[in-house]
Amino acid sequence: MPTVFQKPLISLTFAVALAAGSISAHAQAARDFINVVGSSTVYPFTTAVAEQLGRQGRFKTPKVESTGTGGGIKLFCNGVGPQHPDVANASRRMNANEFATCQKNGVKDILEVRVGYDGLTLSESKRGPTMNLTPKMVYLALAKQVPDPANPSALIANPYKNWRDIDKSLPNIKIEVLGPPPTSGTRDSFHELYMETGCRTYPWIDNLRKMDEKRFKRICHTLREDDAYVEAGENDNLIVQKLEANPNAIGIFGFSFLEENLDKLRGVKINGVEPTFETIASGKFPASRPLFIYVKKAHIGVIPGLREFVNEYVSEKALGEEGYLADRGLVAQPSADLAKTRADVKALKNFAP
């Protein structure tokens, strides 16, 4: 809890910003707790850190909301002041367009903190058939348009109904993949790690990356609109429930969530590699990805506990190989990378994409 001296200081600090024109008149009343939004994948890790900070008794437990990476960054970049979030969780890096929006809205100084790694898994029920997929198979299963088998340089509407239609080694069951909506960072990562990788196995499509990037992304990112891909929202628990109800379906979510449900689910091998802590940390698993939080530097020293929250996040007891976030399923960074992350946090290094 803030002391009686802190609230006037907070209000005074924001009042100075208001006079400078960076905070609207309706936002002069300050918060006495940290507000975090963003990725559903990073949510459980940030929640664990928030609870740890709250238990220390000096500050209120931060409020953490799961809005999806894209939605969270949009809220984060809307402006400076207590009516705007202090931190954004992200299952991908903030992109240049998002950074430009932040800058336009006065969010000039941003601290990027890489908190660890996650594997973006395709998961299946233990009661269903065992799948062994490649990114190309996934692309052919889910893209709205795919190369014509008779003429691979031409695109046709996706004709594949069953997995065996794509490859004779796969089971003869209906294609049904449950995944996140467009606002999710997991969806962005899925496009990059699975759809683009599979798409690029066709040389003429791969060449479009430099020649016509918009067309390349349209071909590789546009998912079919029938019932082969089912948007299941930001709630990974709902995907687990649907996989239990339909053992032939496949779900898309982070490794940390798969690890929590290993009594019911198993990870699909990708290029013959099973998702594990070891394969993700080493980069051997093809769909490993870094996870981040973004911190509004203008709020440090103003919102009570924000600096302490960030320090707790990068502490050894949180991010170390034996830390409490590893117990939640976070794959730790190599020691050299973690040392750099801590140095950047100590220096409050400004982020730029």
Image: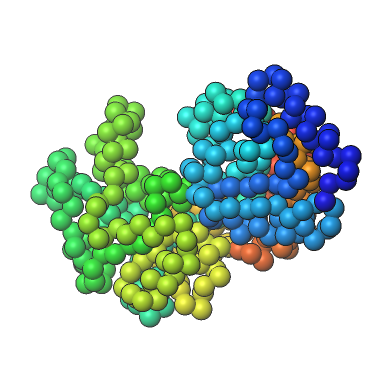
Residue 323 relative to residue 130: left or right: right
Number of numbered markers: 0
Q: Quadrant of residue 81?
A: top right
Instruction: In this rendered view, identify the residue nearer to me: 253 or 137.
Output: 253
Q: Work out whether residue 324 or residue 39 is closer to the camera in this orientation and state it.
A: 39
Residue extending farthest top: 20
> Looking at the figure, which quarter contains the C terminus?
top right
Q: Position of residue 194 (x, y in %)?
A: 38, 51
User: Residue visible at 50% across and 49% down?
Assistant: 68
Q: Which residue is drawn at 26% across and 41% down?
A: 219
Q: In this view, does 195 lie above or below 270?
A: above
Q: Position of residue 75 (x, y in %)?
A: 54, 39
Q: Residue at x 56, y 33 (%)?
A: 78
Which residue, as the protein is rendered here, is positioned at the far front?
26
Q: In which quarter of the image is residue 267?
A: bottom left
The residue at the far bottom in this view is 127
Q: Position of residue 175 (x, y in %)?
A: 26, 64
Note whether residue 267 is visible. no
Which percent across, then down, holds residue 315?
77, 51
Q: Which residue is rendered at x = 55% and y = 68% of the image?
A: 259
Q: Is residue 139 left or right of residue 45?
A: left
Q: In this view, does 305 lie to the left or right of 212?
A: right
Question: Would residue 85 be seen by someone viewing this image from the given angle?
Answer: yes
Report the front residue among 285 and 50: 50
